[in-house]
Image (spheres, rainbow, N blue to C red):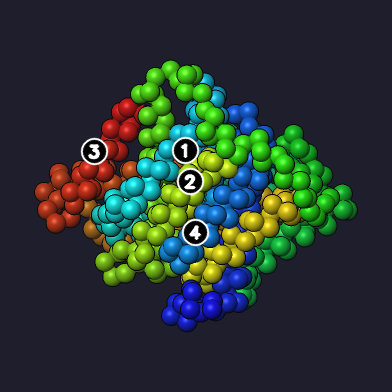
């Protein structure tokens, strides 16, 4: 049955490989179960309700990805989009979180229309192969940077913006976590060098166990004020799901009388739409490129199903009570482990569903244990730079700007914007646009420029 449904042999994989890949993807994404409630609760939402909504929306979206597209990609409420939801739409614009959820719900409905009418697929296919390789490499740097930040190896610095962790300060908490993350990178790297199947997953688990041992003997001391929590599970399961009622269906109770103007609400929807569409496309390009899933023309087969799964999950997630659900770049960790079909996604989705019950256990996995996986996956994805013709300045410069922008601007979509704008303008100025710049690339360039002017 699994063979017939997911075509495992055709994709050169097996049930064992897919299961391991699905578990690995979940482990690298599990942090969203802790981070998303923390961010959205700033808007006044119930943190426990957001946790349940996050898990259920992730389960639904990821299983839809498996059934509609047979790809090993996982979905969850997106980072960046949740911050825009809480800190910009609610806290800055002054809207209620119910109205913000309605904006997300509306965005999802628009996405469904765009997916069914092939608009999003056309955008994907219009991006040149060189930029697709650059997107993959840029995501590699971006995800590695996220890993370094999650582990607090890289920290804020007033003079240089970012710097390395000062191990002399708060060594028993933040410093020890950063050190364990560095050890985890070496452990994971060694396992991969020795070609140990599931090396990334085992790297996460070994690092977590080391953290538990350090806490037991007193070397690592939790300090919640610094974001460092106990890594020892205090409970295994919880069957209290009543909190979900605090957010479920609240999207339909939005008080539109509080809207300052319909124009501003449309701008909010458009902002969600714009960021989500290019974060999703960027992730699909980067991860599918790494897995060699693109055809000879640089197109992703069955992309319509993938985009439709993403769109449906966004609206469903809003009904449950969470911000925009999108395809996660951490899917690359499962792909790196050999995941090639929807079975990987099904395993990941089921683990998100199980996390509703086992949330006390899953939420104990520290960020310094998952950070090594993100850093190593970044190493794998940066290899796409080899596909770029660096001798051809006309293609190499836009590719470089795309790669550079993602980690420095902390956004996949901004990296794509820099790549698209520079590609179009440089080809026009050089008189080489004919046959190299499609009509849709011109449209995207104009839209990106307008975004920077008006948003």
Badge 2 local density, few (<14 within 10 Å), some, or many (20+)? many
Q: Which is more foreground, mark 3 or mark 4?
A: 4
Residue placed furthest toward the bottom: 9
SS of the residue under disc 1: helix
Q: Nearer the viewer, residue 336 or 188?
A: 336
Quarter of the image that includes the N terminus: bottom right
Q: Which residue is mark 3?
A: 446
* Residue that carries the numbered disc 1 in the rendered image: 104
Which residue occupies the foreground of this view, 255 or 23? 255
Label drawn at residue 289: none
What is the crowding at mark 3: few (fewer than 14 residues within 10 Å), some, or many (at least 20)?
some
Q: Which residue is mark 4?
A: 64
Q: Which of marks 4 and 3 precedes in the sequence?
A: 4
Q: Does label 2 or label 3 sit earlier along the sequence?
A: 2
Q: Are marks 4 and 1 in contact (CB under 8 Å)?
A: no
The picture quadrant where one finds residue 157 is: top right
Mark 3 and mark 4: Cα distance apart in space:
33 Å
């Amino acid at each position: 049955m699994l063979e017939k449904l997911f075509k495992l042999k055709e994709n050169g994989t097996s049930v064992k490989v897919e299961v391991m890949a699905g578990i690995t993807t979940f482990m690298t994404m599990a942090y969203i179960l802790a981070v998303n409630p923390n961010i959205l609760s700033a808007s006044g939402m119930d943190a426990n309700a957001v946790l349940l909504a996050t898990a259920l929306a992730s389960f639904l979206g990821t299983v839809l990805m498996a059934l509609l597209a047979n790809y090993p990609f996982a979905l969850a409420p997106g980072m960046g989009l949740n911050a825009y939801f809480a800190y910009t739409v609610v806290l800055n614009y002054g809207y209620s979180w119910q109205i913000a959820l309605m904006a997300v719900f509306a965005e999802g409905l628009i996405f469904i229309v765009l997916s069914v009418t092939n608009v999003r697929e056309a955008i994907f296919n219009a991006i040149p192969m060189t930029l697709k390789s650059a997107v993959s490499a840029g995501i590699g740097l971006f995800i590695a940077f996220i890993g370094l930040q999650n582990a607090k190896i890289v920290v804020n610095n007033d003079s240089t913006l970012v710097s390395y962790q000062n191990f002399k300060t708060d060594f028993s908490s933040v410093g020890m976590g950063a050190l364990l993350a560095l050890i985890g990178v070496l452990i994971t790297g060694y396992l991969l060098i020795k070609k140990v199947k599931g090396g990334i997953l085992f790297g996460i688990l070994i690092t977590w166990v080391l953290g538990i041992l350090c806490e037991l003997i007193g070397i690592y001391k939790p300090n919640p004020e610094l974001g460092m929590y106990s890594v020892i599970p205090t409970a295994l399961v919880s069957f209290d799901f009543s909190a979900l009622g605090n957010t479920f269906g609240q999207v339909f109770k939005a008080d539109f009388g509080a809207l300052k103007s319909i124009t501003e609400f449309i701008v909010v929807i458009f902002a969600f739409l714009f960021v989500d569409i290019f974060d999703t496309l960027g992730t699909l390009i980067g991860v599918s490129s790494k897995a060699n899933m693109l055809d000879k023309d640089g197109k992703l087969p069955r992309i319509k199903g993938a985009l439709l799964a993403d769109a449906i999950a966004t609206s469903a997630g809003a009904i449950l009570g969470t911000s925009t659900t999108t395809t996660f770049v951490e899917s690359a960790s499962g792909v790196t482990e050999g995941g090639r079909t929807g079975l990987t996604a099904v395993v990941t989705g089921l683990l998100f569903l199980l996390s509703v019950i086992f949330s006390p256990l899953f939420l104990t996995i520290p960020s310094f244990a998952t950070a090594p996986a993100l850093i190593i996956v970044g190493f794998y994805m940066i290899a796409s730079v080899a596909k770029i013709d660096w001798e051809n300045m006309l293609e190499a410069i836009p590719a470089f700007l795309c790669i550079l922008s993602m980690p420095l601007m902390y956004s996949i979509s901004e990296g794509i914007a820099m790549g698209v704008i520079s590609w179009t303008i440089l080809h026009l100025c050089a008189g080489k646009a004919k046959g190299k710049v499609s009509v849709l690339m011109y449209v995207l360039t104009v839209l990106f420029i307008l975004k920077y002017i008006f948003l």
